[in-house]
Amino acid sequence: MAEKQKRRRFLGAAGAAIIAGGAAERALAQAPGRKGIKIVGISCSPRKGKTTAAAVNICLEAARQVAPNVETELIDLAGMSIPGSVAAGVPLEPGRKDDFPQLVPKLADANVAGIIVGSPVYFANMSALCKAFLDRCIAFRKKGFALSNKAAGAVAVGGARNGGQELTVRSIQTALMCQEMIVVAKNLGRRVAEVALLVARARD
Ligand SMILES: Cc1cc2nc3c(=O)[nH]c(=O)nc-3n(C[C@H](O)[C@H](O)[C@H](O)COP(=O)(O)O)c2cc1C
């Protein structure tokens, strides 16, 4: 119980740190005439609505604080069936459900300017669900790098201090860089929204 409360306090403090600062960037982001952008957060824990989803939500909250024209959506992969082997061309086993195709238009949407991927730390790396999701994202490379120049962020939640969070974040970032995404690390949600708005403005 005490441990759970400590975890909540930590997440809250992280959120506060993410939200603080950046007044100049916020003013820039709110420049008149700029249409809205969307930031999508993806929680890759098999446990629905748990710590990883909470951490991604905090990032999305921080992203919304950047400007009123930043819209967000959380996609919780828990409960979804995302077979990774399909990425390698292995046919879907008969009767097996595949939930990845429904995510493709959501993420490739031109209005989605930033994506935040969150994973629990499993043996010092990302969850199998996260890896399967990132492997399936090869579909975007095949669709002419449909995620290219979107801002990207990674967040990792571990049960232990020094439990492998850094490597997990780095592994996710590396996979996202393979998609030509622009990886941002500091003050995650805020930076994803700021970079996404700048890229969107440059395209206008
Ligand atoms: C198979 C497995 C391996 C884990 N390995 C690690 C680890 O290497 N380092 C760590 O800090 N926590 C580890 N954990 C703990 C989870 O990262 C931690 O409970 C996390 O909060 C789970 O995220 P969730 O609440 O979103 O499901 C592991 C948990 C499981 C189930």
Image (spheres, helix red, strand yellow):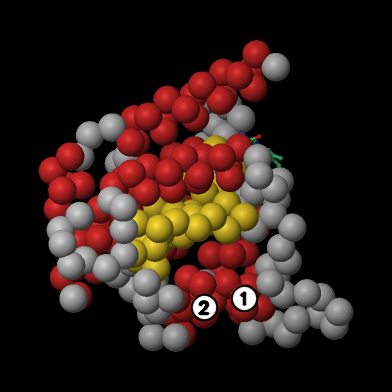
With respect to residue 27, does 162 lie above or below? above
Where residue 175 appears, as percent x and y from the top left, is: 44, 62
Dot label at residue 192: none
> Ligand 1 is found in which quarter of the picture?
top right
Are discs 1 and 2 less than 8 Å apart at CB? Answer: yes
Q: Which residue is pictured at 68% across the width and 72% down the height?
A: 99
147 or 86, which lies in front? Answer: 147
Q: Position of residue 61 (x, y in %)?
A: 43, 44
**Which residue in the protein does label 1 denote?**
102
Q: In the rendered image of this protein, does residue 158 appear above or below residue 107?
A: above
Picture quadrant where residue 188 is located:
top left
Task: State the separation of the CA atoms marked 1 and 2.
Answer: 7 Å
Residue 8 seen by the camera? yes
The image position of residue 163, as x and y in percent, is: 55, 32
For label 1, the crowd category at 10 Å Cα-Cα, with few meaning under 14, some 14 to 19 and many 20 or more, is few
The quarter of the image holding the N terminus is top right
Identify the residue under disc 2.
Answer: 105
Whether ligand 1 has any atom under 8 Å from the Cβ at mark 2 is answered as no
- The amino acid marked with disc number 2 is Pro
Q: Is residue 24 left or right of residue 168?
A: left
Q: Amino acid at mark 1?
A: Gln
- The yes-or-no answer for disc 1 within 8 Å of ligand 1 is no
Mark 2: give few (<14), some (14-19) or many (20+) Cα within 10 Å.
few
- Name which residue lies at 66% across and 44% down: 49
Horizontal side of 68 relative to 102 (left or right) equals left
- Establish if 23 lies above or below 115: above
